[in-house]
Amino acid sequence: MILENITMAEFKRHLKKTKTIIFPFGTVEEHGSHLPLNTDTLIIYEVLKRVIKERKVFLAPPVYFGVCTTTGQHPGTISITPETLRRLTYDIVRDAYKKGLRSFFLITGHGGGLHSSALKEAAEILIEELRGIKIAVLCPYDILRKELADLAETPGDSHAGEIETSLVLYLSPELVKGRSKEDYPKLPRPFVVKDKIKYWRSGVWGNPEKASREKGEKAVKLIVRKIIDIIDQAETVPPVS
């Protein structure tokens, strides 16, 4: 049930069947010169539309803005602070709870460390405050790291690389503008630098030229199956008392 497309009467009827809602999180972020700025949001929202065909839960509109650090200076990236993401997450889950929802899945298509940490921190606050809830925070790229790596020909593939390009080729091929060349960030870890573009001008981490629609289809099926498994697993997890 896509939340934004239903009426309040439909919401009330569906609430009698399920008290589970998925909140997708994405970004407006550079993804090389070949993928759109909404890549993270597009992928996760389209995947979750497939999930709710299998499990009759609520799907909220995506949160388009996220925490972008390494890509924060690149053209087109519009980032928010971890504090803003924590507060936004807290507010929307808390209000959804008031409307009768009790099981919350915060699923992010952006794997940034500070971004994911902000979602987890919000979840920790929420389980202390709201009785009777279940809450999960996950990023498909983290929980399927090995499986997605096995699909790729590129070792260490990541941002705007082989897998992300394959996913967009499968989900919205008209948005893929050619291919960026293979590249990797050269940031002087563990140092934090201000001028990140100096060390990573292309914004590509991997080899988009190895991408294919077929790999994208396989990746989508993997992610959909895993998320469904986690939703089903919630049945065995006791709510917060």
Image: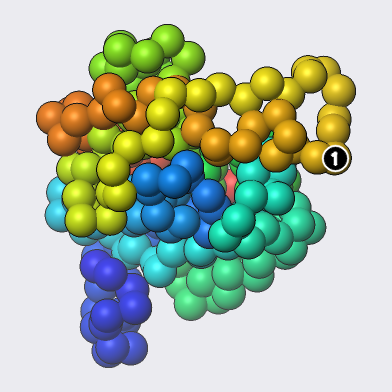
Q: Please indicate, yes or no, whether residue 105 appears anywhere in the rendered image.
A: no
Position of residue 124 in the picture relative to residue 105 (left or right): right
Give percent across and percent down for residue 85: 68, 59
Picture residue at 73% right of the left edge, 34% below the top: 198
Q: Please indicate, yes or no, whether residue 53 appears anywhere in the rendered image.
A: yes
Give percent across and percent down for residue 230: 36, 35
Picture residue at 64% right of the left edge, 44% below the top: 71
Quadrant into which the N terminus falls: bottom left
What residue sits right under mark 1 in the picture? Answer: 194
Position of residue 80 in the picture relative to residue 152 (left or right): right
Number of on-image labels: 1
Residue placed most toward the observer, 240 or 139: 139
Looking at the picture, does residue 232 appear above or below residue 154? below
Residue placed most toward the observer, 227 or 203: 203
Q: Coloring scheme of the render? A: rainbow
Looking at the picture, does residue 190 appear above or below residue 159? above
Give percent across and percent down for residue 50: 20, 51
Picture residue at 73% right of the left edge, 24% below the top: 187
Picture residue at 47% right of the left edge, 42% below the top: 32
Q: Secondary structure at mark 1?
A: loop
Give percent across and percent down for residue 93: 57, 64
Residue placed most toward the observer, 185 or 121: 185
Which amino acid is tagged 1? Lys
Looking at the picture, does residue 11 appear above or below residue 56? below
Q: Residues within 10 Å of mark 1 (few under 14, many from 20)?
A: few
Asked where in the image residue 20 lies, by quadrant, the reply is bottom left
